[in-house]
Amino acid sequence: MIIRVIKSIENHQQLLQLINNQDIMIRYGVTINDYETRNDVIYYTIHVNDQKAIKALQKRYSDLKALNQKIYQKNNEFKLKLSLPRFPRKKIFGRTKNSQSDIKTRGLELQQYLEIILNIPTLLSFQFLREFLPQAQLLDETFRLEQINTEYSKDLCWLQMDELKKSFLQRQEQFQSNKKDKSKGKEISGYYQRFHFTINEFAIQNDFVLYFIILTDTKKTTKYRFEARYSNLRDCHHLLEKQQFKNSLPHFPKRRLIGQTRDNPQLIQERQEQLQRYLNQTFSVKEFVESEPSVYFITKIKLEGKPIKQNLKERGSQLSQQVIGSSFNVSQGIEEIREQKSC
């Protein structure tokens, strides 16, 4: 028992060191003060809280061990290079469930582990971890009252009308599209492109080019400005290729075989346009958008990017473009990409 307590203290010191090394701000607190036994299995009662809400859930040690393995897998797969806390080990001798003190000690170790994991912003880009958090709207992309002026209520009302109108138009066009396709013996679903990318700026660093990208989410009133290197976007492309999309993805701009892109402003401009085209083509196809790499990519931008508030004029222009445009057909989109690749 004394050894387990010492190890618990060592784990706590390790977690504090991780906080300092990764400059982690504690937003979510975790407490494990209780447990229950079901069918000879220990279920720990976990409370995750922030300043606004609390979420309670019950997990077995094996559930959290599987979670830890998945985190390590994603850390390697997505090249996150995170320094992760050590997961509490199993007892070498005896069984934890046979000792109440051992159960409590393990609960404390799991509590310390989870408190670090749930406060690493990059990891919260994954849905399997966001399920632990107390607020469903984790990203908090919606309006913040303290940051919006007295026109807030009008703005909200206008946006609700916007959403209703867009939903109605989408259903109408979907109905007409399906009606036409049924006569041909097939039924196709429509998809309105939600995410749009613009790359207008770049900066030449010591040995690479940094692109400044604007993400526009047509369902929100906020744009996001983020920075990315060519290699960052290429890594995302490779992750999509692993999702069985290799033969249907748009072409990703190739690296130069001779010379460096950063040494030629004209080549940088060309690559900037190619990357913008690639992002918009990729996010115009529903299957690509809903894949884990794309969800991670968008979530990371919203968590780490700089939000830029849109005014009503911009939203009005955005809505008019949606109304004028027609729904994007998934199969048609993939076919167009294939045609471009064959040219």
Image (cartoon, grey):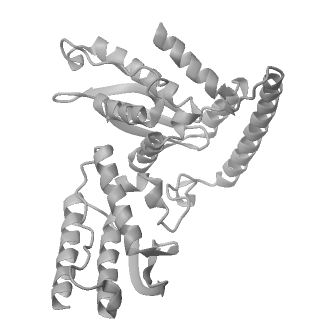
Q: Residue at x 49, y 55 (%)?
A: 139
Closer-to-camera residue (23/187): 187
Please identify the quadrant where the N terminus is shown.
Answer: bottom left
Left or right, 335 with reference to 212:
right
How many marks do you count on the picture?
0
Image vertical order of residue 123 relative to residue 273, above or below: below
Residue lying at 57% horizontally and 16% vertically, measured from the top left: 336
Which of 115 and 302 lies nearest the eye of the viewer? 115
Residue 113 in the image, given as x and y percentages of width and height? 30, 71
In the displayed structure, does residue 60 sit left or right of residue 79? right
Q: Is residue 104 above or below residue 314?
A: below
Residue 113 seen in this snapshot: yes
Taking the view exactly as shown, the residue that stands out farthest to the top is 343
Relative placement, left or right, of 169 versus 47 is right
Q: Is residue 119 visible in this depiction of the protein?
A: no
Q: Position of residue 289 (x, y in %)?
A: 53, 37
What residue sits 59% from the left and 44% below the top? 220
